[in-house]
Amino acid sequence: MPDLLIAAISFSLSQVALGLALLLRQPGWGIRERLYGLLMLAIAAYLCMPLVPGTVFEIPTATLQTAAPGFFYLFSASVFDDNFRLRPWQLVLVGFTVLMPLLGMLLPAAPRWLFFTLPQGAEFILLGLTLWVVSRHWRTDLVEARRRLRLGFVGLNGAYLLLLIFSREILFPGAAWLATWEYLPPALLLLLINLALLEYRSGLLFQPVAKAAAPEAPAVSVDPGLLARLESHMQSETAWRQMGLTLGELASQVEVPQYRLRQAINGGLGYRNFSDFLNSYRVKEAAERLASPGDAQLPVLTIAMDAGFRSLSSFNKAFKAVHQQTPTAWRRAHLGAADAA
């Protein structure tokens, strides 16, 4: 085994061990911590592959390494989506990329296209989903550190995984030089990941997912005059009713730069994304109208659209996050109480 390969694997494994040690220092483990731990184990398996050929560890190590793209996608989604929940279809997709190659190694004369080529295609889908998750809420993300992290942490690692899979499976399958050089970038990437953990672990990467209905306590001091002007504008102009209102448009209306408005909403009011900030006003207005006898004949959809929601499904989701019941149930309960009174 070349000395360069041994050095690259050794340094990378030391960075995996450091990352796991930093993870173990976390006071409590949520979904992010578990997914990150699984991702580190999958990366460790990938790094150990040159060390286990012909041993009893070859199949379990190869199986675990195939889970790296899936765990990377799930961890990224948990970090950058404030409303992340692990869904069955996600588990099925990740499981498909892991279990099919395992069956292909265990079954004699297994069709390669079914047990290896198709799961490899699913890995590209997972990486595409990762890029979509990273870019989807970038404009509405109010946490400045997380906005930077989207481009750095996920961008670099996602690009490497995409390039690795594409090179190993399509461009240079079986190339001897790739067997050594593919292990050099992970050493640098893992070092950058650990630096990000040291900088962000207490308040970003491993912070429990906040509910949309419950903004965090304000983290920094913000100009109270700006907060007052923002609240006055929201109330006097009912800005939240503008369907599709963007952060840039609201900043223009309040006459402040976008970065200052972002700091005010996040640092002064505790919201982590712009949609949750707007929905707090929209849900409040809708709840009041649903409980009003004067609007009892109006369809729920009409009230939702008047408040600024784009669709009934998005309204139901936001409303239930705040009140733990559907808009119809809320209306029935409050109008029934008013009739009884």
Image (cartoon, rainbow, N blue to C red):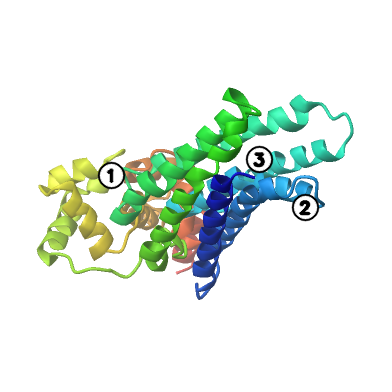
Q: Which residue is mark 2?
A: 57
Decide which of 128, 103 is in the foreground and name it.
103
- On the image, the x and y values in percent for residue 156 come to 42, 42
Which mark's residue is nearer the viewer, 1 or 2? 2
Callout count: 3
Numbered mark located on residue 277 in the image: none
Q: Amino acid at mark 2?
A: Phe
Residue contact at pointers 2 and 3, CB within 8 angstroms:
no
Q: Which residue is mark 1?
A: 241
Q: Is residue 139 above or below residue 202?
A: above
Q: Can residue 81 be seen here?
A: no
Query: Does residue 319 appear left or right of residue 17 in this picture?
Result: left
Residue occupying the point 46% across, 42% down: 133
Q: Which residue is mark 3?
A: 93
Question: Mark 3, residues whose alpha carbon is within 10 Å: few (<14), some, or many (≥20)?
Answer: some
Q: Amino acid at mark 3?
A: Leu
User: Upstream in the sequence, badge 2 or badge 3?
Assistant: 2
Decide which of 321, 30 is in the foreground and name it.
30
How far is the residue under mark 1 from the one under mark 3? 38 Å
Residue occupying the point 39% across, 38% down: 310
Q: Is residue 175 above or below residue 227?
A: above
Residue occupying the point 73% across, 31% down: 116
Residue farthest to the right? 108
User: Upstream in the sequence, badge 1 or badge 2?
Assistant: 2
Secondary structure beneath disc 2? loop
